[in-house]
Structures are given as structure tokens and as C-alpha cells.
Amino acid sequence: MKVTAQPADSTLTLILDGELDASSAVVLDTELNKPELLKYKKVLIDCQRLSYISSAGLGVFISHLQRLQDANVKLVFFNMQEKVFNVFEILGLDSLMNIVPTQEAALAA
Amino acid sequence: MPNIRPATWLLALATGSWLVLLLGTLSQGRPLLGLPPDWPRWLLLLAQGGFAASVFLYVRLQPDALHGHGFLPLLRRLFWRGLVLTALMAGVQGFVKLAAERALPLPGDATAAVGYTISLALFIILLAQTLYVWRSLVNFRGSERLKREWTAFELILGAALLFQLLVWHVPDFLLLAVIVGLGLFGVYLSGHQRWVAYLSQGQKVQAIMLQLGVLGFLSAFLFVLRGAQHDPILLAPPTQQAFLVLTSSFAVFYAVAGLLVTLFNLPVADVYEQRRAEILSLQQLSQIIQRGQTAPEIYQALFTSAVQTIRADAALLDAQLQPTELPGAPITSLAHELTPADREAIRGQQAALDAPGQREFLDNDLPRSQRLTGLSRPYGSAAVLPLRSSTHDYGMLVLLKREQSGFDPEDLSILHTFTTQTVLSLENLQLAQEARISQRAQDELRIAALVQERLIPKRLPTDNWFEISTYAQAAKEVGGDFYDFLHLPGQRLAVLIGDVSGKGVTAAFHTAQMKGIFHALMQPNPLAKKERERYPDPHRFMVLANEALTHCLERSSFITASFYLIDYEAGGFSFARAGHCHTLYYHSIKEEVSYFRSEGLGLGILRDASYGRHVKNQFWDYNPGDVMVIYTDGIPEARNANGDEYGEDRLAQMLSESFYQSAEEINRHIRQDVQEFSKGLPLHDDQTLLVIKFKSAQPQG
């Protein structure tokens, strides 16, 4: 999986491309662990090209949820494929995380 | 080079004495160099003896020309030298004859005298060459005693040289007795023809030819010299009879004996004995090594076998017990006939012996190469064998013999076989140890799987109100899925199913923990006021379980679970879903298959009191004939060869095909379809499938 970071002003967009499983989860974890991440007001996750997410991938977001919340950084997912959204939904993360349909909605969130 | 000086001296002495001999011979019957004619006989004999002695000693000082089993090169060299010497002699004799017949303007007796003296010198040179080639052959694989006997033979030959000088009037019978005695000694020495046993058929033919040639050259010289001595024209003193007779007869006899042995291939018993010993020793070694359980035992077997087979006078083996490059790794050290100081001296020179990548080698002349110096006793030859595989250096074996040329390439190849076998065994040992360690890890994993297996309820709750069928399959030895049942008083049944995120042993630990939490929370609360409150409802169960997990679940892990509390007296159940797969349900009145799409957050995701807001308690009244299918994500997420997922739709389809059957049949129908779907592929995730069918039958009795 490929993770591309696009910083813009107070917003950081992470573009995920591929399958987020146990092995690629490490890459994302490294990205989210960067201290400068907490300087942004929003971290947007572009899921358009995210084709699969495993429980290890979910675990990465879960483990950073509290830290980002404490630092007042909003975590917003957008452009999520239905299959991936189902995984979030079944686990109940849709009630906990900000998942919006489009980039515009994400920027407005 | 320490022996240049004596060699130079000997050459000078030989030349000087030959010149004196030549002049003395020429002085017979005529004045020479202003000196009176007929120089005294003793001077000529002295000159002759001096020449013979210096030539023999000179050849003796040359390094042994025999290298390993190079008998043919040795004989060939002797043959060519003999040929050159004989050709020279023939040329000289031809010239003398020519001078006599054509009446060249030369005094006939003088040319004869010069020719004779030159021929005599050439003969002595040939004899010396032959004698020392024979020495190499006699001493090949000979004992120390044989070498002493040879030295004695040489000393007596030397003494014979003095016979006619010192003892002026030797009685004939005494001379005869000495000559016969020495001759017999020579015959005895001629019996040592071990080298013949090492020749191949083709080599034997060549050896016979070469020996015949050498015999021919010797005969030619004897014939010419004897003839010349009876030539009336020659006025020369008699030759050193005893010495030359003895030496030439030995030379001839050894050649003849060698010829006979070669021709008839007479077995030389002790050579075969030694061969047999080598084979036996090799067999023993490989047996010991096969039996050997530990590296020190293998080294000990190698060391003993090598020392015994090669009959080394001293030996040292330094080797690592484990193949490791670390300094200070444990070392085993075995020594034979070496003082601690010797060992240190050898180790000090180890670096020079063991150049990286260098194979084993022989040094048959330690005094000359100055290797392995400073030992308490002088050693003549050494064999050095590194114990080395393609990947590791185990150590080095050093064998020493007191005499020079103690080892031959045959020895080296035997030792090489020993060390190769040893290294092989050491590597096998290493592999066996690694296999044992990996076996232990597998055993422990198997035990973990057994423990987990025991956690799965074996006895399913049975009642006339419902049927339960279970199926569980872990993808690895241990899995992250779990389920459990508990009968509660008042005709209630608690059912728990769940899935720990992640795989392997960590996940397996948490399944055990969940089981513990389940049984702990399902203890009756004695403070409860109402019967219904004695046990936590599903929502409360999830909140308490989430709280219990907060302290032990790693931050990135979570657990999904569904908890059902079935009250079959009331014909309904309450349940809560914590991020777990939606429950599949067949509604018998509506004749409809559907999923309970409810909200609920997985356990361990929110670790504070707010979790309670994210999980809900739900109620459902069931009818007889309703079917509940509870499963983990390994079922809908099973994949086929194209990577497609099995999916909730196909699962629902399976239930609609089989709802009227028994719980066990429904379960089998679904799992067979899943297995068919991902046929030939390894299990991607743990799979658990529970089917509960509610029945109309009233409880009996």
C-alpha cells in the first residue's frame, strides 16, 4: 500500500492507495505517529483507492483516535468505498469517526 | 641456507682430489710438473678415496628427491643422468681409441690415463646418484630402525673406503669376509621394496624399463673400467676395490631385486597391513562419528584416529565447539605428546599456517622451511589440516613427525577424508540441534492449541426448546475466535461469540481472557433485588467487559463480540452487538431471511465510560422454527481463487435454502458451501459458525 501525504495550510491529507492489512498498517502507523501531525487542525484520509482494510488497519486508526482527539485534531475520512465503509460500520466505528462522502464535505467538516 | 658451505667445500675437495688423481696417474712412468715420476701409490689412493667420499657426501646432502609417490620421476631422473654419464664415458673412451688407432700426435698412454680417470670419476658419480635414489626407495615408509640400519650401512661403506689407505696389508680372507658380510647387509636392505606396491600396472612396466636402463649403464661402466684396468698401455694404480665393489654390487643388487619384485609383483606384507589398518581406522572413525552425540566426542574421535593411523609423534587439535565467529567462543583442545609451551608455540604460529582459504598441506622439511619452530623437541615434518566447511571455520589439526618426509600425499588424503567426515558430522549435529529447537517451539504451539481446544465448550447445552450446532476452524495452530455457552437458572441460556483482532498467540491469549470475563460476569449477583437482575443484561455485559479489557488489551487491538441472553421460558432473547458480524436470522412466520442490522461499537476501542453510549440492548421474540446463524468474519470474508469475498448475500442464500433442516444440517450446508467457495486455498482467517434453531417442542417433564 502507498501512503501519500499532502499538507495544505492547516490540513494534512493522507491518500491511501491499495490494501491496508497487517503489513501495510506499519507504514500508516509511522505516518500517523509523526509529531508534526499534531500541528494540523485536520487530518483528512482519502480512501478512494483504499480497496481493503483488515482489523490490523482499523487498529491503527483506533490507536491514534484518542491522541488526535486530545490534541484537538480532527480526523475525517472521505471518498470511502462501500465495501470498506461496511467494515467500519460493522465495527461501529461510523458512530465514532467522521466519515463523509466527498473531499468538499471533509474540508467543511 | 645452512648447507651451502659444506656443499661448496665438498665440490672443491672433489675437484681438487680428482686433479691430484689425474696428475698422479699421468706421472706414472714420466716426470711431471718438474716432479719425479711415479708419484707414491698412497697419494693416488688418497686422492681417489677423497674424490669418492666427497662426491658421495655431496649427493647425500642434496634434499630427498622422492616426493610422495613420485617413484617414476625419481627413476626417470636417475635414468637420464645415467644416460648422460654413460654417453660421456663412451665419448671419452671413443676418443682414446681413436687416438690410439689414428696415431694422433698424442702420447697413447697419457690419453688412456686421462680417459680412465675421467671414466672412473663418471662411474663414481653414477654410483653416488644410484645409491641415494636407492636410499629414498629403501626408506620409503620405513621405520626409524630401518633408517638407522641404512646409516650403519653407509658408515661401513665409508670405512671400506679407508681399507686400502690405513690397513696396508689386509689379509685376503679378512677382506673377503668383510666384503661378504657387507654384501649380505646390502642384500638384506635390497629386500625393502615397498614402493613397488604403490605402482600401477603401467607404471610397473615403466619402472622395469628404467631399472633395466640403470643396470645397463652400471654394467657398461664396469665392463669398460675392468677392461681398461687390464689394458697394458694403462699405468694406473688399482681402484678402491672394496668400496667400489661393495657399492656397485649393492646398486646392481637393489636394481635386480626391484626388478624381480616388480616383475613378479611379490606382495610386501606390511604394506598391505598398513593399508588395512587405514581402512579399519576410517571405518571406526565414521562409526564413532555417527554415534557421537556432542562436538567434543566427534573431535576426540577424529583426533585419536588421525594420530593412530598416521602414527604421528605429536599432534594438536584446537577447535570451536560451536560454529561461531565470536572471539572467546568455547574451544576444545586436544594434544598428543606436546607440552603446554609447545601448544602455545604452535598456536602462536597458527596464523601463518592457516591462511584464509588455504587447504590442508604437508611440510616435509620443517628445519628448512622454518615453520613450527621453538618446540621442545625438533620435528622434521608436519601435516596441517583446517577443519572448514563452506560456511564455517571449526579449527585446525596439526600432526607432527620427528623425521623429515614423514608424510606423503597418501597420508594427507586419508586425513582429508577424516576431517571432511568430521566437518560433515559437526554440521549434521548443528542441523539436528536447530531442528530440536524448532521442534520444541512447534510442540509448545501445539500445547497452546490443545489448551485453546479445551476452552471450547465440548458439551453443548441441550434442551427440547432449541438445537445448537457449532463449527470452528482456526487458520493457524491457535486462533482468535471464541464462543461459549452458559446455562443460567430459570431456563435461560447465555451465548457469547467473538473475534480478537490480530492472529496467533497474542490473539489466543485474549480469547482465553474473554472466556474468563464471560464466566466471571455470569456469576449471580447476591445483592440483586429482582431475579432478572441477578445477571447482567447484554448491554451491561458489554460495558463491563470493555472496562475489564481496558487494562490489558494493547492500544491497537480490539475485540468484536455478540452476546445473547435467551429466555426460552418467555420465548424471546435480548442481545447486544459489539462490532461483531450481524446476526443472520430466519423468521418463520414471515418466511424471510434477514440480518439484524444494529449498531454497536467493538470492545477496547473506547476505553472510558462513554463506551456505554455506543452499544445497545435489543430484544426479540422468537417463534418456533426460527433459525439464528451466528458467525465470525472468517465466513463472509472467505475468499476464492479470484480474491472475491464469500459475502453476506450468499450466506443468507444458504440459510434460505436450508432453514427447514436441523441445526446440524443447516450448519453443514453453509460450511460445505464456504469450503467449496474457497476450495484449494489455505484458510485465510479463523472461521466459527453457530446455528441455533428454536423448536416448538414443549419441555418434557
Image (tube, coloured by chain):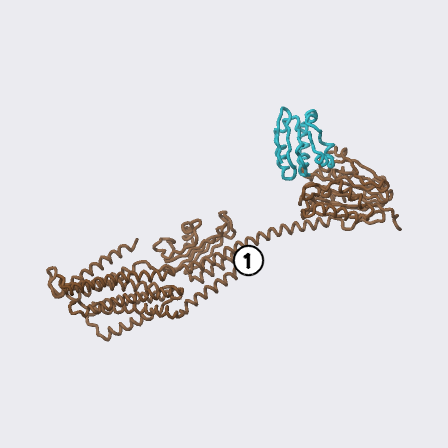
Chain colours: A cyan, B brown
On the image, which quarter does residue B126 sit in? bottom left
On the image, which quarter does residue B167 sit in? bottom left
Report x, y in % for residue B606: 72, 34
Report x, y in % for residue B631: 75, 43
User: In the rendered image of this protein, does residue B155 appear above or below residue A69?
Assistant: below
Q: Residue at x 29, y 59 (%)?
A: B61
Left or right placement of residue B41 versus residue B187 in this view: left
Name, please, the residue furthest toward the front. Answer: B102
Q: Amino acid at mark 1?
A: Gln
Chain name for mark 1 = B
Between B64 and B145, the one nearer to me in the picture: B64
Left or right placement of residue B625 versus residue B424 in this view: right
Left or right placement of residue B239 versus residue A77 in this view: left
Report x, y in % for residue B451: 70, 50
Q: Is residue B525 visible?
A: no
Q: Which residue is mark 1?
A: B293
SS label for mark 1: loop
User: In the rendered image of this protein, does residue B196 appear above or below residue B471?
Assistant: below
